[in-house]
Image (cartoon, rainbow, N blue to C red):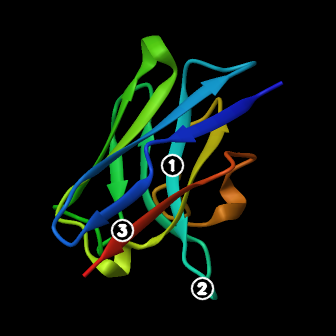
Amino acid sequence: QVQLVESGGGSVQTGGSLRLSCAASGYIYSTNCMAWFRQAPGKERQGVADIFTASGSTDYADSVKGRFTISRDNSKNTVYLQMNSLKPEDTAMYYCAAAFGRPCNIFRWRSPTEYAYWGQGTQVTVSS
C-alpha cells in the first residue's frame, strides 16, 4: 500500500525558513511526479511546486518562485520543500501528492485531480 508521510512543519516568524519532507513507501515506480500543495482555511488547495523524480525538472507557483525549492532523493524515496523568506500568507496545511509512473504535466500540475496519492498534511504557520 502506497503511503506518503510529510514532516517538518512548524511555526516560524516572517522571514524564517522551514524544510518539509515527504517520504513515500509502498509500490513505487522509478519515474514519478511528486508535488507539494497547500490549503489555508476557507481557500482551495493550491499547487506550490512539483518535481519529476527521473530528471529533477521542476515547476513552481509564481507566489513562491525564488523562495521555495523542491528537490528529491531517489535513494530515500523522499521529496523535500525548502521554504525560505516565509511570509504570513504562506500559512497553510501543506500536503505531499504523487502521481506514480509518469512525468508531471506542465499544464495541469497545479490541479489536485492529477494526483492519486496524498499525505496527511503538515501545518506551517508564519507569524508577523
For label 3, the SS is loop
Crowd class of label 1 (few under 14; some 14 to 19; many from 20; radius 10 Å): many
Q: What residue type is labelled 3?
A: Ala
- State the image coordinates of residue 34 (x, y, percent, origin top left): 53, 41
Residue 18 in the figure: left or right of residue 51: left
- Name the mark on residue 61: 3
Q: In which quarter of the image is residue 89?
A: bottom left
Regarding residue 4, the answer to whether it shows in the image is: yes
| Labels 2 and 1: the sequence-earlier one | 1
Q: Which amino acid does label 2 sit on?
A: Lys
Q: Residue furthest bottom?
A: 42
Q: In this orientation, which residue lies closer to the viewer: 27 or 88?
A: 88
Q: In this orientation, which residue lies closer to the viewer: 65 or 94?
A: 94
Q: In which quarter of the image is residue 100?
A: top right
- State the image coordinates of residue 74 (x, y, percent, origin top left): 44, 18
The N terminus, quarter of image: top right
For disc 2, the marked residue is 43
Q: State the CA–CA distance, disc 3 to disc 1.
A: 11 Å
**Callout in the foreground (2, 3):** 2
The C terminus, quarter of image: bottom left
| Labels 2 and 3: the sequence-earlier one | 2
Crowd class of label 3 (few under 14; some 14 to 19; many from 20; radius 10 Å): some
Q: In this orientation, which residue lies closer to the viewer: 29 or 19?
A: 19
For disc 1, the marked residue is 35
- State the image coordinates of residue 125 (x, y, percent, origin top left): 41, 68
Crowd class of label 2 (few under 14; some 14 to 19; many from 20; radius 10 Å): few
